[in-house]
Amino acid sequence: MQEHDGTGRVKLSFRSLETDGSVSSERVITVPTGVSAFDAASWNGIAIDSTCGGYGTCKKCKIQVTSGDVPPAKLDSRAFTQEEIAKGWRLACLVRTVTDVSIDVPPLTTRPKAATVGVGRQVILRPAVQKRYVELPEPTLHDQRTDIVRLLDAIEDIEATVSLDSMRNLPRVLRAADFKVTAVFIDQALIDVEPGDTTAVRYGVAYDLGTTTVVATLLDLNTGVPLAVKSMLNKQQPFGADVITRISATMMDPTALDRLRSLAQATLAELTKEVCEEAGINPLHVYEVALAGNATMTQLVLGIDPEPLGVAPFIMASADYPDVEAIELGISIHPRAKAVILPSLGAYVGGDIVAGALASGMDRDKRLRLFIDVGTNCEIILGNGEKILATAAPAGPAFEAASIKCGVRAASGAIETVKIVDGNLVIGTIEDTPAIGICGSGLVDACAVLVQLGLLDHSGRFVTAEIAAEISPLLAPRLLEREGERVFVLTWGANVGDPSDAVFLTQRDVRELQFAKAAIATGWALLLEEFDVEERDIQQVLLAGSFGSYLSPASAIKIGLVPKLSVLRIVSAGNVAGEGAKMVLLSAQERHGASALLEEIDYVELSDRADFNDKFVTRLSFPS
């Protein structure tokens, strides 16, 4: 047996066997101590039989420990003979890795239950919420076991912990249901006993708590299927568009923290009610929720003072939160429901990015990949599965159009695409309604098109009217002076030729975009340096978040927001923060994976880099 390296991690050597006993593959992986062999294998794509998802009830995840000290668990004696146990046979879900071990994995006879979540990820369905239906013998003078002992004696596979609160209604429920009940557990904790068989009713809600938008997804924990999705603006909006203004509010007004907490909780409560109503689900059957948010949003919703996040050296109250009752989030679901708070890497790389990294498989994919979550604060991850770096870049509000003259949120009537067809400008609006302004994706498209045509030079300055007339006679009339500033009209209102009745792009808008994209490009360029790789080495760029879903890869390349690669290498990852939150509800092993990311990702601080400003200035120009 090998000794583990003393860093809280152990090595597992897996040999996957064919039906004839030959070895089909061998893998050596390193995982945190205490992780089950089943979880470790699943994280790394090693298939081990299971139909219960790793709870010891199906007794199918049989493995043979060939070296290493792994004492048998109580349930192993129900799956194996004493002779088999002596030969090292164990249930993989019960093998806790505290020392280095070698394991033989028999060939599959069944397929594990799984759901597709994240960026094409297959997630083994094993939620922390478990239900067990039992029919108990009624007490007699010869069987005077207590109610709780009677119940737990009938449930062999869970070594339960019991709270006073979960026992209060136990005598009444047992007798009203003729001792036919369903016990509800979260991990090992008994949280309720329900009359009858309610095993088919098991739900959770995943939240993406954004600074601007909050999304809630109701999940069937039995199947992994989303039943309803709702989103709305964060009710904290009156306190400012970004985390800095909200932190400042708590510093200026002693009552602001309580108000911000109440507004965040009201947002979650309203969304929870909406998803339950849409799916026709009783909120009392929602037993667990998961929340992915940046560090500021997380501390605000929990009522933790965020001031240290806003001033150097930018310190969080905690990277990983202890067990949280769902009631702390102000939502009305099962009274003993739990909340999983995704951990944060740093003050500006929060739980939403950890969730995104989990959903994107940044710790598992061996390709060199660049993950960019574009927003007011842009988070960037570069990794190849073995080495992972992360940073945050202060992009500002340009991509959310908050600082743009005709900027609007991504809502009906917002210009979201800008193209040139046969020399003419063609705009697309959300829901194809009349243009009311321009949102972030439209801003990127517009600048990319103007750079391509030459109406914007590479320094970001609009060309003169004379040059515009030579380059593009059809579009030159759209380049005007308004209130002493050069503007380009994207679409006219009722009075064609009147820039006051139009949606337009100003010289200052272009500068705002340049500052934002330069901050992001400097961020990923510095990570490339730290990694000692070139732009051309990147095999995939993931654009995350709602903005990334609508951003044109070609336009992003044209303005220098992302590396100059084939557009086929640049893909939308969607709302991976919400996907990561869903994953930790559906799979306890993914929950461990999220925590493990804190150790696996190295954070690179940009604010103290002496070379940041010089590199930022060189990235301001649009690429040739």
Image (cartoon, rainbow, N blue to C red):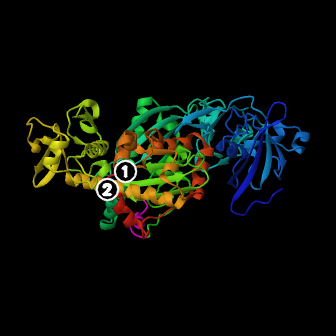
Residue located beneath label 2 in the image: 621
- Which residue shows up at 33% across the image and 55% down it? 516
The residue under label 1 is which amino acid type?
Answer: Gly
Instruction: List x then y, in percent, for residue 595.
Output: 58, 53
The magenta span reads: 299-312
Q: Nearer the viewer, residue 308 or 335?
A: 308
* Residue at (12% x, 37% y) in the render: 493
- Quarter of the view holding residue 186: top right
Residue 486, how many percent across, how many down? Answer: 15, 51
Residue 513: give x, y in percent of width and height.
29, 52
Labelled disc at residue 560 = 1
Tag 2 and tag 1, C-beta contact below 8 Å: yes
Residue drawn at x 10%, y 45% as measured from the top left: 500
Q: Is residue 563 above or below residue 414?
A: below
Left or right: where 154 falls relative to 469: right
Label 2: element kind: loop
Image quarter of residue 460 = bottom left
Looking at the picture, does residue 565 appear above or below residue 201? below
User: Residue 54 bears which disc, if any?
Assistant: none
* 310 drawn magenta: yes
Front position in the image: 409 or 605: 605
Number of callouts:
2
Q: Is residue 336 visible?
A: no
Q: Let me know if residue 315 appears in the view.
A: yes
Label 2: how many residues lie within 10 Å, few (<14), some (14-19) or many (20+)? many
Please give left or right for residue 366 compared with residue 556 in the image.
right
